[in-house]
Amino acid sequence: MKTNRLLVIYITCLLFLFILGCQKDNHKPDETDQIKKLTTSSRTSLGDNYFNGVNNEATENEMDLKYDKENKLIEIGLFKFIYGANGRIEKKVFINQDPNFPYEEIFEWDQLGRLKEVKVSSANQSIEFTTEDGEISNSLTIAQFEYNSTEKKPSRIYYRDRLSFSDSKFSKFKSISYKYQGDDISESLMEDINIPLLNPYHFMYIDIKVFYRNGNTKHYLKKIYDQIGFNPITIYEVIPKHLPEKDIAILVQDNNSDPNLDWNDATSYTVEKDNRSRPIGVYKKNLILNPENGNPLLSEESKTIIDYN
């Protein structure tokens, strides 16, 4: 009798531990690590001896982020995401959609669950989208992703910049390619970046190669990037595991070979952290020189403030 009672107690304890374990497995991620707001600001300076210097006004943008009960991102800034039955994002639309401008972005995924293509369209095909190189379409491809074999991170992204919301105009295709070191980016190549050279109406198209030295601070957008499969702010930017510590941007020319990098002259990232070691502020200043005369061609100061729930 005593043996039976001990057996019942033993089985009851095992059952309790099993239930406790299941509850732990089903525990939702810590919501206090969710980003609730991002505030970005930047100031770009363009100039050399010809241009006499032009300073663009600083721009600032605030984006609120919202999540569903399963902690999936559903809103950021002016837009909301619509998920399909497969758990992947199918569409991105305005939160307050204008019935006269039913704009939407459509996401297509490959068999490995990687983002393949993004198209811009309208709910009733009523909008004609145009590009600076003459394309006109009711369903315009604005991003395409290439991958090496079964790698999850893209090797190259083709994208169009939005030139205007008022006339639904986009740039010609540009591209950015990536090389990786583990889960971080070691270098990137941005092609066909256009900047004013001689005056505000004379543009020069340039290619810029960027080399990165990675730090130890986890990127504040990494969790969101892994969850939805792309950068929700800038579609063509890959989010690495860690924030870079430094980078060097070099203007690419026909006779360029990979340079000897002097990290003493590199752009530094300044990261401010809270008492939980989470990044709450990221500051950076870029400088690119005109190879023809050595004068500053482009400099940019940027700041991102991160607020958590």
Image: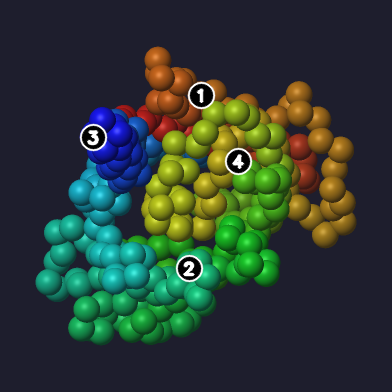
> Which residue is pictured at 20% across the width and 83% down the height?
124
Judging by the rendered image, the residue that carries numbered circle 1 is 271
Q: CA distance from mark 3 to mark 2?
A: 58 Å
**Amino acid type shown at disc 3:** Met
Judging by the rendered image, the residue that carries numbered circle 3 is 1
In contact (CB < 8 Å): disc 3 and disc 2: no
Q: CA distance from mark 4 to mark 3?
A: 86 Å
- Does 92 appear above or below 220? below
**Marks 1 and 4: which is nearer the front?**
1
Q: CA distance from mark 1 to mark 4?
A: 23 Å
Judging by the rendered image, the residue that carries numbered circle 4 is 298
In contact (CB < 8 Å): disc 1 and disc 3: no
Mark 3 and mark 2 lie on one chain; the one further toward the N terminus is 3
The image quadrant where one finds the N terminus is: top left
Q: CA distance from mark 1 to mark 3?
A: 67 Å
**Marks 4 and 2: which is nearer the front?**
2
**Marks 3 and 2: which is nearer the front?**
3
> Which residue is pictured at 48% across the width and 33% down the height?
302
**Marks 1 and 2: which is nearer the front?**
2
